[in-house]
Amino acid sequence: MKAVTWQGKRKVSVDEVPDPRIEQPTDAVVRITSTGVCGSDLHLYEVLGPFMDRGDVLGHEPMGIVEEVGSAVSGLSVGDRVVIPFQIACGTCWMCTRGLPTQCEVTQTRDQGTGAPIFGYSKLYGQVPGGQAELLRVPQAQFTHVKVPHGPADERFVYLSDVLPTAWQAVAYADVPDGGTLVVLGLGPIGDMACRIGQHRGYRVIGVDLVPERLQRGRDRGYEVVDLAAAGNDLGEVVRGMTDGRGADSVVDAVGMEAHGSPVTTVVQQAAGLLPDVLAKPLFKSAGVDRLGAIYSAIDLVRRGGTISLSGVYGGAADPMPLLTMFDKQITLRMGQANVKRWVPEILPLLTDGDPLGVDTFHTHAAPLAEAPQMYERFQKKQDGCVKVLLKP
């Protein structure tokens, strides 16, 4: 089959790789019809190379049609149309039954000390071949799927794999009070969708970014936007000026380590990427390698007694956090990978009864799988208004 493979820093290619097959009775094989390129994929493209091998198949936002089902898989049949959540979980362990499939006790990546494996997402999360491919083997398929109806275009459902539940959890964790103000830092796919969800729930929403096309998308959806390029170091004052001098009730950081921040940590990221893997891996895990501009902004912007929700990915373990300020302001901080199946029952009715979140037209670019290298570059460089890419195998 054809698949998008990692070949080095800022280099992916579309190659012939062996077709996946049933390896365990709990497996299924899915023929992929649409698959997204995620902002998290850019971490592999740019920063997390020490945890990748050449030829690793990328992608964790797929959907398609079931081609084959293992003997132990119930509730799933050949021909079913499914979205595949980005994490692999059993559905029955202590963590899964408490709505935390990201921490599945059956599938945890114990050799790395991390949670449930993620499709196409490095040795840190199991090195499982991903879904930017013509076919995908799905482990723990009895739970690792979301069945959706035939009929509507893929664009209606594909974001159940990651974007929708990640943004939904980000807003849920932000704990916005009724009639409250939600500030979202970063208007990439997750941030934009978090703003839309906040609007849908009736909150006042303020989105912050510095990319003109992203800001315009926000204006077109009808939520308030702040241009970071214009606000600069006065962002906190700007937001407080919009919120009676108090600050936002809740802030979602949808940026993570892509943020523009400390030049020191930027150099560390770049230097670590040039080291031999045996040296770079422990540096990434134990040193401060994140650019913390976004989270520092969130701590500044949130009101006293407010809540910060982190959905952006952070990787370092020794970055300085302003705990004195966080304690003094009595800030609540929630974070983590999205527990996809936990939120699907709340989201799915919005996809089968109209389109209040605008998913049908959410993507900015769609391309054949063969054009993945160009799409990665365009997305990484934010060229041509590229906010969300869908690949069509």
Image (cartoon, rainbow, N blue to C red):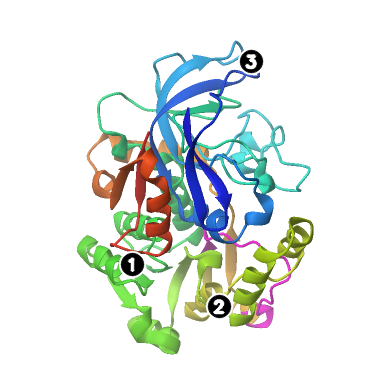
User: Taking 390 as reference, is 187 above or below it?
Assistant: below
Counting the numbered discs, the total is 3
User: Taking 246 as reference, is 53 above or below it?
Assistant: above
CB atoms at circles 3 and 2 under 8 Å apart? Answer: no
First reached walking from the N terminus: tag 1 or tag 2: 1
Task: Determine crowd level at label 2: few under 14, some 14-19, many 20+ residues with C-alpha closer than 10 A.
Answer: some
Q: Quadrant of the C terminus?
A: top left
Camera-side residue of 54 and 248: 54
Task: Determine crowd level at label 3: few under 14, some 14-19, many 20+ residues with C-alpha closer than 10 A.
Answer: some
- Residue 312 belongs to the span the image colors magenta: yes
Amino acid type of the residue that numbered disc 1 sits on in the rendered structure: Val
Q: Which mark is residue 40?
A: none
Asked which quadrant contains residue 217, the reply is bottom left
Q: Which mark is residue 25?
A: 3
Secondary structure under badge 1? strand
In the image, residue 38 lies at what x, y percent? Answer: 45, 51
User: Taking 83 as reference, is 49 above or below it?
Assistant: below
Amino acid type of the residue that numbered disc 3 sits on in the rendered structure: Pro
Question: For this view, does 314 lie left or right of residue 386?
Answer: right
Instruction: Give the main secondary structure, helix, strand or loop, of the magenta stretch.
Output: loop
Camera-side residue of 345 and 42: 42
Q: Which region is colored magenta?
A: 309-325
Q: What's the residue at 25%, 36% (across, down)?
A: 353
Q: Which residue is mark 1?
A: 205
Q: What's the residue at 57%, 58% (across, down)?
A: 9
Amino acid type of the residue that numbered disc 2 sits on in the rendered structure: Tyr
